[in-house]
Image (tube, helix red, strand yellow):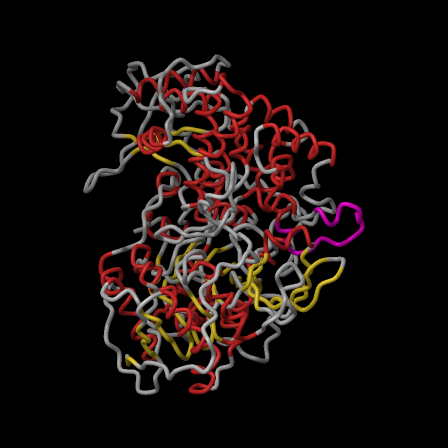
Amino acid sequence: MSTEPEPPSTTENTGPGTPDDAPPAAGTPETDPAAATAEEPTSEPTADETSPESPAAGATDAESAADESARKLSEAEAELAAQKLERERIERRKAEKQGPIPAGTKLSGKAADLLAAVRAVESGEKPTATVFADPEPAPRRAAAEPVRRPQPVAAEPTATAPAPETVEAVRQVLAGGGAPEALAAQVAAALGEGAAEELGEDPWQLLRVPGVRPEQADGFARALLGAECAPDDERRGRAVTVWLLEQAALAGHTALELPALTAALAQRGVPDADAAVQSTLAEGEALAFQDAIEEQGAAPVRVTGNEESEDFDGSDGSDEEEAGPVRVLVGLERYALAEESLADGLARVVNSVAKETSTPWESAAASASGSTAELIRAVAGHGLVLHTGGEAARAEPAALLAAARSLGLRAVAACHTPDGRRRLAAHLDAADDADGFLVTLPGLLSGAEGPGRDTEGAFVLDLLILLDAPQLDVETAAMLVESLPDGARLVLSGDPAVLWSAGPGRVFADLLAARVCPQVASRTPDPGPLGELVSGVGIGELNQVEAPGKEIVIVPVRDAGEAVHRTVQLVADSVPRAFGIPAEQTVVVTPGHGGAAGTRALNAALKERLNPGPGRFGGFDPGDRIAYSPVPGRTVPGQVVTADAQGLHLSCAGAAVVVPKERVEQSVRHGWALTAHQAAGSRWPAAVVVLPGDAAQVLSRPWVYTAFSRAERHLSVVHGVEQALAGAVAEVTAKPRTTRLPVLLRTQVPAAG
């Protein structure tokens, strides 16, 4: 790769300003000292840049349709409706599981306390133990009977705006505690009809609003309660516990180990962390589990007990087995139930397909070669198959799709983004009509794309191939798997070196680690200097790559201000002039939204140069590039067309989208510059990756791999981190996430040979 400083620009640097028109899309809160009790929820990523939007953000997505009951649901509304229906289905399924719960035997200390505490909760009494965890869930059947969720085309919106009188009552309570009255609508939406009374009785419920931090809620509580406010207040302990679990979900965890949770509570000034967890579990605001731990080199262990007794409490019994080591986890119900539902569904997929050795499959495999033939043979004999590889490896699932359809199977391939669908279509016969079998995952789940559903709500298909599988979060995965009909095959394909999902979980990585199904690794390398560079990053090496056509250019900078200046030069002048790639086909990728060279600063400078204007439509002008988040955790690039009384009109992947004006600030931000998570799933002819000096601490190998691999023809690296880049590639792997899926899978699905 070459180091080529760019020629001086004739355009003055606009500076790294932080515009107010960049709304929060998803992420952890960023401290704003000017806020009294709440701050703007930003998308500032953590080290692994896990920044999903708070689940509450989608609650008002259908407000604009409240007075138009006959209006057809938009894709986003249908998707949210599907999510709501799936959560209700999961809750019903859990309620049906009334069988005995096996637990550890011969336990002592906190583990024994956990068992007694859970039994007290189940009997309706308030527990007295100091720490809590539910025992290991009962073993589920190997191939569960499918419970289909209805077709997600409900005519009713998923949520309505809170009543004006409710908002006004909340506003008065907020004013009494010195909190910003602008939070009234969010509080009313989060707490419901009795929001004012509930907030008055428990001021720490303010933490339900995304962006509010414990110290801000404490200030509100002191102003509202006066002398009654105390650090050891049980209400505070519960609220902070739930808040910490929500923050963990933003960082990708589906649960927290009990010691980590109690330590975090102590750091937040909760005097008795064990009592806080106890109270939270007793009130049903979180769930707790005991999961068996597999020791290195040892056979899997099981936590078992007298499964015939509903009242088993860990006492000695002649039919009990020796318990292995366990870990105690605490998590929010929505993610716990999603992981259990996903494990159930995957077990059904694995066990419901009989191995086929028919001539048609063998004929299709014989006409292929290498890892493509391996993939076809694996799918012929198994219900679930994992496929790994880079961008060039997409040709293999494309060949599988073509082979399956030639055999008369109802085969469908889904991608997370329209651009991913475009890139997959490039590997198929251009004469094929791909409208029915090449879809986006959001469109498939919402019913807007794909083969449709049967009367039980299952997809009408025999084979589903999902690409870019690392982007799959646990809730979306649960919805997808539960929608598969019995006997259908599922292929998950993706590059395991990229960043994990923006939402909680690490589904693809967990499945790879669990080894419960065949895994086919592609032997098709990505070509050219860019492919060589990215492949090296994937194995921890930042290699010097020969780039005779200047496919890779390093632009050194001294500080963040120069990084912004150079980035604007590259996008507006250098790349178009040298490679003929227009500015609208170049993406800028930077580690975070905040900071002097984050997305806000870069988007302000790029707008000033490429599409200056007054921002009269909520900070936007026609022609602005945007990043639109129709639902939490998903970003769709697009462009502003116009605005009117209906809202902001966008063009996203050729589709017209209207964002109601009350949703613009929450779901639309400028999109010349994106974070790596926002850019994942799409590629552009050119990419400019910005690495200012203050980014050194958040770089990791998956982040660098994801950012560098967004470029198809040219990559410019605005480099200000010196040796930290090579160090991150060599030493900083993916930040661990705490999930339960591997343990749940091992209890239901035998390991693949």
Q: Residue at x 73, y 35 (%)?
A: 163
Label total for image = 0
Q: Is residue 405 left or right of residue 346?
A: right
* Residue 544 on the magenta segment: no
Q: Position of residue 581 (x, y in %)?
A: 48, 82
Vertical order, 211 against 630 (above or below): above
**Residue 467 appears in the picture as rendered:** no
Q: Is residue 192 above or below residue 499?
A: above
Q: Is residue 234 left or right of residue 459?
A: left
Percent of width and height locating residue 386? 39, 57
- Residue 246 visible in the shown view: yes
Q: Is residue 72 magenta?
A: yes
Of 418 and 29, nearer the camera is: 29
The quadrant of the rendering that contains the N terminus is bottom left
Left or right position of 563 against 413:
left
The quarter of the displayed image where residue 119 is located: top left
- Residue 313's x, y, as percent? 36, 16
Q: Which residues are magenta?
A: 63-79
In the depicted structure, whether residue 105 falls above or below residue 93: above
Residue 535, image x, y percentages: 30, 70
> In the image, is residue 145 above or below residue 98?
below
At x 68%, y 61%, the residue is: 648
Closer to us: 749 or 624:
624
Which of the 4 quarters of the picture holds residue 697?
Answer: bottom left
Which residue occupies 22% across, 65% down? 723
Q: Residue furthest left?
A: 297
